[in-house]
Image (cartoon, helix red, strand yellow):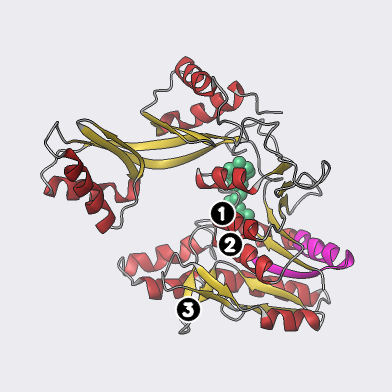
Amino acid sequence: MRILVQKFGGTSVATAERRASVTSKVSEAIHSGYSPVIVVSAIGRSGDPYATDTFVSMVKEICPDLPKRELDLLLSCGEVISGTILVSTLISLGFEAVLFTGGQAGIITDREFGDARIVRVEPGRILEQLAMGKVVVVTGFQGITEDGQITTLGRGGSDTTASALGVALKAEAIDIYTDVEGIMTADPRIVDDARTINTVTYNEICQMAYQGAKVIHPRAVEIAMQRNIPLRIKSTFSEAPGTLVTNMYPDRGVGTDITSDRIITGIAHTPNVTQIRVLTGDVQEKHLTDKRIFKAMALADISVDFISVQPEAVLYTIQDEVASKAINILINMGFEPGVVNSCAKVSIVGAGIAGVPGVMANMVEALSDAGVTILQSADSHTTIWVLVHKEDMVKAVQTLHQKFRLGV
Ligand code: ADP
Ligand code: MG
């Protein structure tokens, strides 16, 4: 059996016309000899009647502190609705199709409600149906704990469902269908001449995704990478080949490193971060003070990023939504934190950055020419990050995209 996982994002199932594009992709897969397993996300975006964010705002008005276990029951409904609509469409067109929730599909997770991790997949039920010639539709973004509690997988969770099923079913490929033609050199919503990347490694795309390129979830990339299952990101609405994520260059032979001829893969951005600066002074045993600060953040479940420990200060960033909580903790500890709200992290990602001189110099020059203030910076062997004011974010991404000639 040649299994193909096809995941369709929220925008792909919203209207009858769009569902026709979905069913033609399913049909093409069957005609090419595949047994398709379809993963579907909730319909639409925030504000749409069946979008997950809409459900959340409905109950948050009644009970802002609804326990996460109960909230997950509601969060899992969006995919149940879109899955039922898709399976109805398929059956009405004469396909033999069956719908499973994440739990029914054998997706077992831990108990971290709202952000659960898949611990294993029991693919027996899906394989049984595929063997009977059925098209299997699975609701994305959700699973079940060992003791039968429904969990959701967090933002981008349907991508993770697709990858986990791809690995468990030993699929030939995992196709992620969305509303853009593939992974691009920057978010096409803010960079007009962003270019679709034809082939890219798991590592490069994982970095882009971690830095905010939300076209694919990084966890989904990591899972596919474990078994080297090719991931393809394509548009539901076109025939374009999209982006192939793999470790091989199909046209250059197995094992060829595809990163070597490209320094920079793309520019990613993450808005809504707050920079915190705590002046610790040149105290004795400063490391103990530093440790106390980070321990306090960890105890409050606040994840910190962009950390810079300096002789008389510590500097780090957090998500805007937890800023007031973090500031209160620091004040209660006796500090007077300096706070810069509404920042954005802009990153240049490329496996070829390491050891190439001048990338940072070019970045600083381009941003300063464009009048963008760099609040902080950091780098690794694949990424250079800068923190900027949120109002400069779009300009920074566009400027860097142009400076490094990533466009068409
Ligand atoms: P889906 O509902 O199909 O999962 P998402 O909204 O999660 O769709 O992801 C697709 C969106 O990701 C695109 O519409 C695009 O605006 C955004 N995006 C951000 N960065 C990139 C990038 N580098 N390449 C392509 N799309 C990107
Ligand atoms: Mg998505």
Q: Position of residue 389 (x, y in %)?
A: 38, 31
Q: Quadrant of residue 84?
A: bottom right
Q: Is residue 324 visible?
A: yes
The residue indicated by pointer 3 is: 145
Residue drawn at (66%, 66%), measured in percent from left and top?
A: 167
Residue drawn at (36%, 28%), measured in percent from left and top?
A: 375
Q: Are marks 2 and 3 in contact (CB under 8 Å)?
A: no
Question: Which disc number belongs to residue 160?
Answer: 2
* Relative to 329, 163 lies left or right: right
Q: Is residue 387 visible?
A: no
Residue at disc 1, secondary structure: loop
User: Ligand 2 within 8 A of label 1's CB?
Assistant: yes
The residue indicated by pointer 1 is: 217
Q: Is residue 351 magenta?
A: no
Range shown magenta? 20-43
* Relative to 318, 232 lies left or right: right
Residue drawn at (68%, 58%), measured in percent from left and top?
A: 12
Q: Position of residue 7 (x, y in %)?
A: 68, 62
* Amino acid tagged 3: Thr
Question: Gap in Å between the C-alphas at discs 1 and 2?
Answer: 7 Å
Looking at the picture, does residue 376 appear above or below residue 41? above
Question: Gap in Å between the C-alphas at discs 1 and 3?
Answer: 22 Å
Crowdedness of circle 1 by 10 Å Cα count: few (<14), some, many (20+)?
Answer: many
Q: Nearer the viewer, residue 177 or 66?
A: 177
Q: Quadrant of residue 399?
A: top right
* Relative to 304, 170 lies left or right: right
